[in-house]
Amino acid sequence: MTGRDETEALSVAGEPSGALERHSSGEVSTKRHGSGEVSTERHGAVDTAEEPSPDTRPQTRDLETSLTAEAATAPDTASGGGSDDGDDDAAPHGNGRRRRPLRTSLIALAAITVAAAAGVAATGTIGGDGGDSGSSAPSGPPATAKVERTTLTDTETVDGNLGYGDATTVQAPASPSGTGDGQSGQGQSGQSDQSGQGSSAAGSAGDGIVTWVPEEGRRIERGDTVYRVDQQRIPLLYGSFPLYRTLRSGSEGDDVEMLEKNLRALGYKGFTVDDTYNSATAEAVKEWQDDLNREETGTVAAGDAVVADGARRVADVKTSPGAALSGNVLSWTGTERIVGVDLDVQFEDLVEKGTEVTVELPDNTTVRAEVTDIGTPSTSQGDDSADGSGSGSGDSGSGGSDDKATLPVELTVKDQKGLGRYQAAVVQVTLKAESRKDVLVVPVSALVAQRGGGYAVEVVTADGTEYRPVELGMFADSRVEVSGKGIKEGTVVGVPK
């Protein structure tokens, strides 16, 4: 009988022809033939019968639970403890996500096939004495690698879109109500029927004529002109809500304080920034109006300025000089480039506000980015019942089987210069899934399956080679974390050529 430390190909009882094959870089594929024989094939990089497509990962993850039972014959993959709670031992350090142990189990199961084939290549036999003559036995492994001490990081790479974010629309101010103060012609008389069709009053006298609009790509900051109507400048102010009423001496409220903050930021003085509009505020407003070449009334109407939460970049101009001031005037975005990602919800646990990621640009340069906003999950086709079928409301799920739930994620890039001249581009975003520091690793292809379960590596010594059992930790980048007696940094192990 052969010794327990000999290597063998793992066969699963009752496994049908065409059993599951997993292909990873540096591994070996095992194929089952109709006769019941198992053949192993060594490749320069690990081959597989079918290369999984990028969108098969969800299905692969669905298989993990069912495969974990088969992987249970392998040794504990993390701490190597002998308890029955193998999942606890295999759980990744850090955030303690349960998804990663299942994934590790799947990879470990695939590694069994690799290990069995590696044993065949290294020893020339599958558990038997195997050889017609001693001259045919190999003198050592076909190639070697050293055990390395490093930080092992598991990552996920997803598609992202570089741009300036979602655009918002600047609309012409609403027509003054009957309770207005009668100040016509100061930008307030522009009409906007928010349906976009225009009301019957929109073309009446007093709407105003657009006389200037900015070009696309223009940056507009506080105090700059957004557009002109009847040659009067409509400036940008910073705030969280628009001007909605006429402000004059005696007015009180948050909008008064917002106006006074803007006047102070623009250099006007002589008043106190508070929520009260008094004569000192009115004097500052007159100075501001004089600088805008407007009538010095000391009052501010709703359409006298456009309010945004910061500087803006013009994305699209929707009107032109000579048109009546009505409807949408232009759309704009933020001024800094960001990266948007529609993240598959299965990776939701990899992001939270403040998470750092790496962004690869089309020219292969990279920049660091940070998650600054996470939206609400949605499906790619939405929930519109366009087909008019009430029965497809989502209870059966058959009508939306092709929909993929995604999570909108916004990434902020602090190093805007690092983005070069790209204004819009498809980029690759790398998310860190798990990281283990200061661990010993070997190529996955160095693993050898042992008779009765477990793994070993073929260690090259001064006297030849010997198989030493190892316990497995995290898998990443075709490498695996290992530990065991006689395994240390610099140990030489056999690998496929």
Image: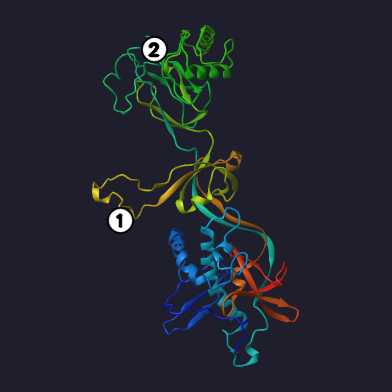
**Residue 496 in view of the camera:** no
The image position of residue 263, as x and y in percent, is: 54, 16
Going by the numbered disc 2, the residue's amino acid type is Gly
Image quarter for residue 97?
bottom right
Check disc 1 and give the amino acid type: Ser
Circle number at residue 181 = none
Element type at mark 1: helix
Task: State which quarter of the image contains the C terminus.
Answer: bottom right
Residue at (68% x, 60% y) in the render: 150
Pointer 2: residues within 10 angstroms few (<14), some, or many (20+)?
Answer: some
Give the residue displayed 57% in from the left and 48% down from the top: 357
Looking at this view, is 245 or 289 the one in front?
A: 245
When the figure is inspected, residue 244 is found, relative to residue 184, above or below; the finding is below
Q: Which residue is mark 1?
A: 398
Left or right relative to 219: residue 319: left
Q: Which residue is mark 2?
A: 185
Q: 488 or 380, which is in the foreground? A: 488
Q: How is the image coloured?
A: rainbow
| Residue neighbourhood size for the residue with mark 1, other residues' Cα within 10 Å, grouped as few (<14), some (14–19), many (≥20) | few
Query: Residue 407 at what x, y percent from top left?
Result: 45, 47
Residue 461 appears left or right of 481: right
